[in-house]
Amino acid sequence: MRVLLYTGKGGVGKTTAAAATATLAARRGLKTLVVSTDTAHSLADTLGLDGGWASDAPIEAEPGLFVHQVDTQRALEDSWRELQEYLTGLFGKLGMDPLAAEELTVVPGAEEVLALFQLRDHVRSDAFDVIIVDCAPTAETLRLLALPEVLGWYVDRLLPVERRVVGALRPVLTRVSGVPMPTGPVFDALERFHAKLAEVREILVAPETSVRLVLTPEAVVVAEARRTLTSLSLYGYRVDAVLANRVFPAEGADDWRSRWVAAQAERLAEIDASFAPLPVYRAPYQPGEPVGPAALADLGGRIYGEDDPFAPRDTPDPLVIRPAGDGAYELELALPGAGKGEVDLARRGEDLVITVGAYRRVLALPAALTRRRVAEATLREGRLRVRFQPAPEDER
């Protein structure tokens, strides 16, 4: 099964690109699902369907093409109930209005996470040949994709301690603080939530899964897309293509459009150079808004031509750990586009903390590396290399 995620800066046309790719896949004989993780659903509108719905299950838009705008409210109630009930009771004890308390129990980004849980269920069902995900805009997507590791660190390191402490001291803490302490079912619910997130991450970092960056040939958009490529690689996600949308055709251009064509040609050359060796597909500016399966299939054909955008890509693993001789190991992480001044590295116990600009990854080191010290780190040609040497006590 092929899983393709489309993301980009808000307004660049990622939903249209995702829908066009999905429609093309269905018309090439692949059973296809396109699902949206963006809470501002516009996927159904793009496909010419009644866009006001969300559902528990996919709806067939045309033969072989299924659409799922996730009913996040119902999914939230199913997956978040125990935690929501505890938090609502806690806020109520603090004197908060019940309606306001219920609103505050919804963690920011929870709806997008629950949409990814639906993706997990679809992949596990093995009912489709291709699943295409219309992601939220870039910033939200990056925060979302970082969540599995962040929550995993909390669940693995802190939750067992908190469970023991609260379990032993719950009566005293409740009496002293005057608010209810979390019970076993609350901790169990959080652990189940984490387990689902871990499965989602396994799907998203699998070789069959790729991210595609949608952009328009404009300076600000291209700059953000370069940063996005770096950040996605930091978190271990494979990017296998870039799609430049709304490219003006050079033929028959008047003076006004000729200036746009010239400006876009300069940006397109920059895109080719910035994202090499990734393929850069180009979506021509359409004379009208591409809405409905027929228009989207035509656009998909124009974007990909004779290429097969659904075939597996030989995209290198962003993170590699290999022996380096004399008991040393080298950790190599792809950080395309990152400059030396943007990257910070720190060792904290059994974790390696890598910061690139505004984004940070806490990487849990395998046992072979936890017993070794960081000897050196270099950033060359878009790849961070960290060398781990045996600790002095291991060398004696």
Image (spheres, rainbow, N blue to C red):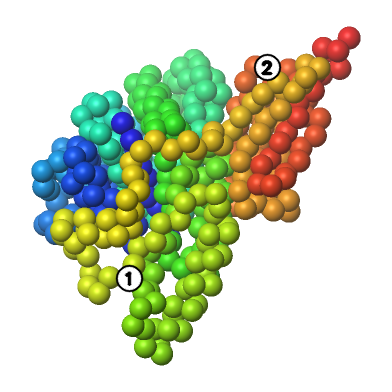
Question: Is residue 140 in sight in this rendering?
Answer: no
Residue drawn where x is 64% and y is 26% of the image: 321
Q: With respect to residue 212, does 375 lie above or below?
A: above
Residue drawn where x is 41% and y is 90% of the image: 255
Q: With respect to residue 101, does 368 lie above or below?
A: above
Image spot of residue 199 (x, y percent): 39, 27
Q: With respect to residue 109, does 89 lie above or below?
A: above
Q: With respect to residue 241, does 365 lie above or below?
A: above
The amino acid beneath tag 1 is Tyr
Residue closest to the far right: 396
Q: Mark 1 to mark 2: distance in Å?
A: 52 Å
In the drawing, what numbered circle is on residue 368?
A: 2
Q: Residues within 10 Å of mark 2 (few under 14, many from 20)?
A: few
In this view, the residue in front, 99 or 115, is: 115
The amino acid beneath tag 2 is Ala
In this view, the residue in front, 346 or 321, is: 321
- Does residue 396 appear to the left or right of 120 in the view shown? right
**Splitting the image into 4 quarters, where does residue 251 fall?**
bottom left
Question: Is residue 341 in sight in this rendering?
Answer: yes
- Does residue 5 appear to the left or right of 388 in the view shown? left
**Splitting the image into 4 quarters, where does residue 347 fall?**
top right
Image spot of residue 232 (x, y percent): 51, 45
The image quadrant where one finds the N terminus is top left
In the image, which is nearer the foreground, mark 1 or mark 2?
A: 1
- Does residue 144 appear to the left or right of 332 in the view shown? left
- As helix, strand or loop, the secondary structure at mark 2 comes to helix
In this view, the residue in front, 242 or 373, is: 242
- As helix, strand or loop, the secondary structure at mark 1 comes to loop
- Does residue 354 appear to the left or right of 289 in the view shown? right
Image spot of residue 329 (x, y percent): 72, 23
In the drawing, what numbered circle is on residue 285?
A: 1
